[in-house]
Image (cartoon, grey):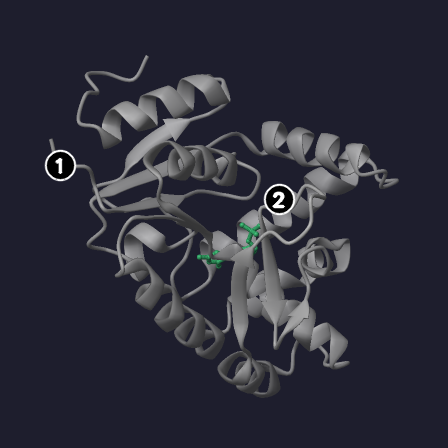
Amino acid sequence: MKLPTTIAIDGPAASGKSTLAKRMAEALEYLFFDTGVMYRAITCAALSAGLSMDEEAKITALSQAAQIDVQPASADDGRDNDILLDGVDITWAIRRPEVDANVSVVSAYPGVRAALTAQQRRIGQRGRVVMVGRDIGTVVLPEADLKLYLDASVEERAQRRYDERLRRGDAISLDVVLADMRKRDEIDSTRDIAPLRPAHDAVILDSDHMTIEQVFAYALKLARGEAGSAE
Ligand code: DC
């Protein structure tokens, strides 16, 4: 039996797609590649350069010049990889609330998407990869062998993100997280270029009604061509 060599996993923020992708990549011995880190890296660079998020031309130029690298983890502090921007470690900086609040705006700029999509495609075409994002099955790797779209209600996703923040020691309210999540969903799914939506041939999984274990087991069966129906 032939395994899919490229697996695309899309879905909204905090739907559990990175967790699923990491586990699949580990099980299949594939590269796990989270494309969201690239949009976050550019947002981080724009903030560090003191740019206002409406300076589209400057942010686009920055995305064309930026060297984003993903390397094996150099520290045992919960990171999956080291994320480097022009050689500087920004692994944790890209998770700051300030980046969360601005990344949807940056990722809606067509020039930024063109620059990053080209890099993502190059990595994807090497094969043996589980690539995660919003437009992997629709735009980055429309030829992917297996496309999954992981969904969950906004309330469930906000609760997960809130729990994650609490564990990290952030003082934040659930209402604020829920409002931010709704705003990001709106921007991600209504932008003109590469909006968040399932590819026509994606398998849609609803993680509100499935544990991560069930989602993982089913996705692995799909990858191995053993899946009958989603239970
Ligand atoms: O998955 P994430 O929360 O790290 O993504 C950060 C932002 O980047 C999010 O607002 C959507 C955007 N993004 C995108 O537009 N396309 C991708 N392939 C990945 C992320």
Question: To which residue does mark 1 refer?
Answer: 2
User: Looking at this rendering, what residue extends furthest in the left direction?
Assistant: 1
Q: Which of the 4 image quadrants contains residue 193?
A: bottom left
User: Looking at this rendering, what residue extends furthest in the top direction?
Assistant: 231
Query: Where is 61 relative to 91, above or below?
Result: below
Which amino acid is tagged 1? Lys
Residue 104 appears at what percent x and percent y? Answer: 58, 60
Q: Residue at x 36, y 38 (%)?
A: 149
Residue 77 appears at what percent x and percent y? Answer: 72, 44
In which quadrant is the N terminus drawn?
Answer: top left
Question: How would you rate the neighbour count of disc 1 (Cα within 10 Å): few for under 14, some for 14-19, many for 20 or more?
Answer: few
Q: Secondary structure at mark 2?
A: helix
Q: Residue at x 57, y 38 (%)?
A: 14
Query: Where is 217 relative to 186, above or below?
Result: above
Residue 198 appears at what percent x and percent y? Answer: 33, 44
Which amino acid is tagged 2? Arg
Q: Residue at x 13, y 36 (%)?
A: 2
Question: Disc 1 beta carbon < 8 A from ligand 1?
Answer: no
Question: Between residues 44 and 28, which one lies in front from this camera angle?
Answer: 28
140 sits to left or right of 156: left
Which disc number belongs to residue 183?
Answer: none
Q: Secondary structure at mark 1?
A: loop
Q: Which of the 4 image quadrants contains residue 205?
A: top left
Question: To which residue does mark 2 refer?
Answer: 182
Label 1, label 2: how many angstroms apart (C-alpha)?
40 Å
Question: How would you rate the neighbour count of disc 2 (Cα within 10 Å): few for under 14, some for 14-19, many for 20 or more?
Answer: some
Query: Where is 228 relative to 201, above or below?
Result: above
